[in-house]
Amino acid sequence: TFAGDLYLSTDSDILKSGTNPFRLFTNGTLSLSVSSSQNATFSKNVNINGNAVLGDDAATDDHTIFGQVTHLTTDALGYKLRRSNGGTSLLISATSDAEIEFGTDNGSGTNTTQWTIGKDGTDNSFRISNSASLGTSDALTINSSENSTFAGTIDSGTITSTGIVKASTTFQSTSGSMSFFVPNVGQAMIIEQ
């Protein structure tokens, strides 16, 4: 038991024999535990001022995070993915829906999700949803056969199709006559307004 501070001289070490973990307590509460395998467990938050490097082998080191990750930055680019050699990829995998949500934070950590994109786990389709979950208010669905379904109106300029264009009920012109063209022929038919 020390009543004051403990100072170590230069190049001194703290050594612990045996297989039980080395533990540090503050105010009677466990703060840090280091096992005989050199695994360290912190009881509370770890604050790092400056850059932090996880691992020392880019090919084999993996890292697991339990809980949410909050990223606070003044950098306009926000999150960055950078690979020192080769391309950069991001894998999002889940046992059900694998998704990314886009929302608005109220400034105190509460998020309101407006859009969700990702793979729907029920049929492996890719969806863009105007909601907090895939399968609800889907704006676009691309199924596993690569067929696309839009929930609303497609507002576009010229649309070129290499196949047959079908309508379940109606082709409609909203401004004037409707013309039909055939390759190497030109205008084949016109329906006047």
Image: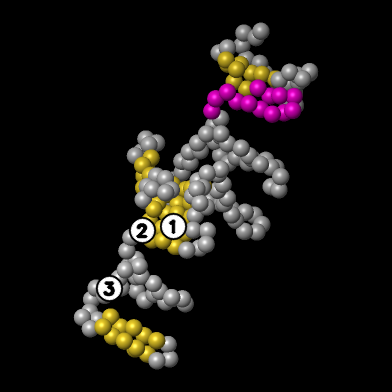
- Front in this rendered view, residue 160 or 91: 160
Answer whether labels 1 and 3 touch (C-beta < 8 Å). no
Q: Residue beneath label 1, please?
A: 141
Query: Crowdedness of circle 2 by 10 Å Cα count: few (<14), some, many (20+)?
Result: few
**Main structural element of the magenta stretch: helix, strand or loop?**
loop
- In whole angstroms, how far apart are the C-alphas of marks 3 and 2? 18 Å
Estimate how packed mark 3 is, as few (under 14), some (14 to 19) or many (20 or more) residues with alpha carbons within 10 Å: few
The C terminus, quarter of image = bottom left
Question: Residue 29's image quarter?
Answer: top right
Q: Secondary structure at mark 2?
A: loop
Among numbered discs 1 and 3, the one appearing first in the sequence: 1
The stretch of residues the image draws in magenta is 33-45
What kind of element bears circle 3?
loop
Left or right of 19 on screen, residue 91: left
Q: Is residue 191 above or below residue 64?
A: below
Foreground disc of the pair 1, 3: 3
Q: In the displayed orientation, state which residue is furthest to the left.
A: 193
In space, the residues marked 1 and 3 are separated at their CA atoms by 24 Å
Are the two marked residues, 1 and 2, in contact with CB atoms closer than 8 angstroms?
A: yes
Q: Which mark is residue 151?
A: 2
Residue 57 at x, y = what percent? 71, 45
Amino acid type, callout 1: Thr
Q: Residue at x 46, y 41 (%)?
A: 72
Residue visible at 69% across and 29% down in the picture: 39
- CA gap between label 1 and label 2 equals 8 Å
Name the residue at the front extreme: 169
**Along the horizontal axis of the image, is 136 left or right of 20?**
left
In the rendered image, which residue does mark 3 sit on? 172
Q: Residue at x 56, y 43 (%)?
A: 95
- Position of residue 33 relative to residue 153, above or below, is above
Q: For the residue marked with disc 2, what is the amino acid? A: Ala
